[in-house]
Amino acid sequence: MTIITYADRELLAVDVANQIADELVEALHGADRVCLAVAGGTTPGPIFDALCAAEIDWARIDVVPTDERWVPEDHPRSNARLIKDRLLVNRAAKARFLPLYTPAHAPEEVLAELESMIAPELPLAVALLGMGDDMHTASLFPGADGLAEALSPKAPILVPIRRADLPETRITLSARVLDGALSKHLVMTGPQKRTAVEAAQDLPPEEAPVGSILKDTKIHWAD
């Protein structure tokens, strides 16, 4: 495992944004459209702030969340809200957003509809991922209902995830889809997460789901 270490979080954000921009430009040389999957949460925000101004043909880029809480886009905990506020602005406003939420009582009612928008854009050109202290990535949470399906080599594109301590049902791209990205970036900050990702490589993915996407992934870390 190679962890790229940065002097501070600002340098990390700028460098990762530049790398993703270069990879998207390269991917567009070989395809009419390409898909960028991005995490929610607080860590990607500064990366979005830098990436949104990149000189890319954003009109040919689809942006999809790696995962989503089953809440409307105007909800404070919506990943879509963060992505639209911080990434899909400036030059990147021309990108097309592929949601993981549409109004329904439960995600199972609309999975086929949501997957039909994503399937033609696979494989992902770039995936920007985060990780929790419990070694989850996207919404692949240890001990969650749906995790085994999401980790399966034959997993569907999208999997609903539930765990008693999670305030909302989650919907996540499966490990198969995330790991199939042509380029993967895992971004972390703080000593606890560095310790966690180092431990994850020696644990089964059921205990450390982030391990399912670590192969050939660029890991970026700042204290």
Image (cartoon, rainbow, N blue to C red):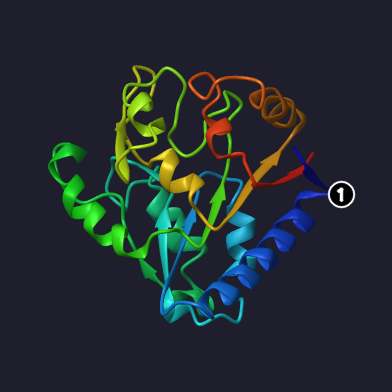
Residue nearest the viewer, comparing 136 with 74: 136
Q: Is residue 162 left or right of residue 128?
A: left
**Residue at the spot 42% in from the left edge and 42% down from the top edge:** 176
149 relative to 7 in the view: left or right: left
Task: Identify the image quadrant of residue 62.
Answer: bottom left
Residue 72 position, x and y percent, is 27, 48
* Quadrant holding the N terminus: top right
Residue at image location 26% in from the left, 61% down from the top: 117
Mark 1, residues whose alpha carbon is within 10 Å: few (<14), some, or many (≥20)? few
Q: Residue at image x 50%, y 78%?
A: 30
Instruction: From this view, report whether residue 145 is shown above or below residue 152.
Output: above
Q: Amino acid at mark 1?
A: Ala
User: In this figure, which residue is indicated by the disc labeled 1?
Assistant: 7
The C terminus, quarter of image? top right
Q: Is residue 167 visible?
A: no
Q: Position of residue 10 (x, y in %)?
A: 76, 56
Using the image, determine if residue 116 lies above or below residue 178.
below
**Residue at the image point whose x is 64% and y is 57% from the top:** 46
Q: Does 56 sit above or below residue 163?
A: below
Task: State which quadrant residue 27 falls in.
Answer: bottom right
Label 1 residue SS: loop
In the depicted structure, whether residue 37 falls above or below residue 78:
below
Q: How many marks?
A: 1
202 sits to left or right of 60: right
Which residue ends up furthest to the right in the rendered image?
7
Q: Position of residue 201 (x, y in %)?
A: 66, 27
Q: Is residue 103 left or right of residue 74?
A: left
Q: Quadrant of residue 107?
A: top left
Q: Is residue 199 visible?
A: yes
| Residue 189 image position (x, y, % from top left) | 71, 39
Q: Nearer the viewer, residue 82 or 208?
A: 208
